[in-house]
Image (tube, helix red, strand yellow):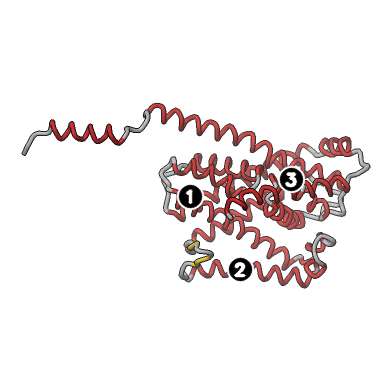
Amino acid sequence: MKRIFEFVWPLVGLAAVALSLWLLYHEFQGASLGTELWANLKRIPPRDVAFALGCVVVAYAALAWYDRIALRHLGVSHISWLFISLCSFASYAIGHTIGASVVSGGMIRFRAYTAKGLNAAQVAVLVALCSLTYGLGVMLIAGLVSVFDPQWLGRFGGMLPEALTSPVTARLIGFALLAVVGSYVLGSILRLKPLTIFGFRLEYPRPGIVGRQLIASPLELLGCAGIIYFALPEAGNPGFFAVVAVFIASFSAALASNAPGGLGVFELLFIKAMPSIPQAEVLAALVVFRLFYLIIPLLISLVIVLAFERSRLALALREGPPAAPLEIARGAECKSVGAPRM
C-alpha cells in the first residue's frame, strides 16, 4: 500500500498542476499576456521591489527560527546559527519548489543534522515541530482575520460552497481555529500528558518554546504575503491583511495539492480572490513572488547543497574507508599477543 501511495501522490500533484494551468489558460484566453505581464512587471517602483526583497529576508529568517526553536525543544545547542540558517534555507527553498516539502526538505535536514550528531528520531521530531509551527501560524492568523474581517472568505465565492463563504460561518471557523491554538498553549502551560495520534507521541513543548512558535510562524507568513502586497498596484489593492488572508488560503491549498511548487493552483486561487485588480497585474505580482521567494532561493540552495555534499565527500576521502571487521579483529589479536602478561 505504501508503494502505491508513492506513485499516486506525485500523479495527484501533476494532475492539480495540469487542471490549474488549463483553467488559467481559459482565464487569460485572448489576452496578449506576455506583453501585459512584462509591462506590469516594469511598472513596479524600485522602492516596492526593495520592500519585497526585505520581506523575503524576513520570511527566510523566520523559517530558520523554526529550526532553531525545534532544536531548542530537543535540547540541542551546539549547532551554529549560520549552519541552521543555511540548512533551513536549502530545505524550504527546495521543498517548496519541487513539492512534498515535508519529505524533500526532511531529506536535506536529515543529511545536514545527522552530520552534526543528531539521530534519525531527533530529525523526525525537528521536521514535525517545524510543520506544527507553520500550522499554528496559519491557524492563528486565519482565525484572527476570520473573526475581525469575516467577509474575506467571500472572495472565494464560486470556488467554495456558499455556506462556507458567509460571514457567520467565517467567524465561527475563526473562533474554532483560535480555540485550537489556545488549547495547545493551555496544554503547554498545564504540562498535560503527551498526545498519541496514529501512534505518534506528541509532547507539549515548554511555554517558552510555544511563545516562540507563535511569533516565528506569523512573522514568516506576513513576510511572504508582504512580497505580493508590495508587488501589487495601489489601485484596487484590498489592503495588507486581506492579501495575507488570501495568501494563507492559496498557499496552503497549493501545499495540500502536492503540486510541484504549487504551480497553477496558487495562481488560480489568488487571481480569483482579487477581483478588484486586473488579472494581468495580479499575475505579475505572483511572478515576483515566485522569482524572489522560490526560483532565486532554489538556485542558491542548490549551490549550498552541492557545497555541503562536496565537503562531506572530501571528509570521507580524508578519513579513508572504514576498517573491515576481519581487519579490526586481527588488529585486536595482535595487540593481545604483544601485550605484557600480568
Left or right for 257, reference 26: left
Q: Quadrant of the C terminus?
A: top left
Question: Of the residues under marks 2 and 1, which one precedes in the sequence?
Answer: 1
The image quarter in which residue 250 lies: bottom right
Percent across and percent down for residue 285 are 78, 44
Q: Amino acid under label 1?
A: Val
For the residue carrying disc 3, how many other residues have a C-alpha within 10 Å: few (<14), some (14-19), or many (20+)? many
The secondary structure type at the circle numbered 1 is helix
Pick whichever, 179 or 306, lies toward us. Answer: 306
- In space, the residues marked 3 and 2 are separated at their CA atoms by 30 Å
Q: Which mark is residue 206?
A: none
| Outermost right residue | 30
Q: In the figure, 113 relative to 327: above or below?
A: below
In this picture, residue 279 sits left or right of residue 68: right
The residue beneath circle 2 is 180
Tell me what residue is drawn at x 47 percent, y 70 percent. 192
Query: Of marks 3 and 2, which one's residue comes earlier in the chain?
Result: 2
Q: Nearer the viewer, residue 59 or 166?
A: 166
Give the alpha-carbon distance from disc 1 to disc 3, as whole Å. 28 Å
Q: Amino acid at mark 2?
A: Val
Is any atom of residue 325 visible in this view?
yes
Look at the numbered discs 2 and 1 and tell me whether their residues touch, using CB distance below 8 Å. Answer: no
Q: Which residue is mark 1?
A: 123
The local secondary structure at tag 3 comes to loop
- Look at mark 3 in the image and give the residue it sits on: 263
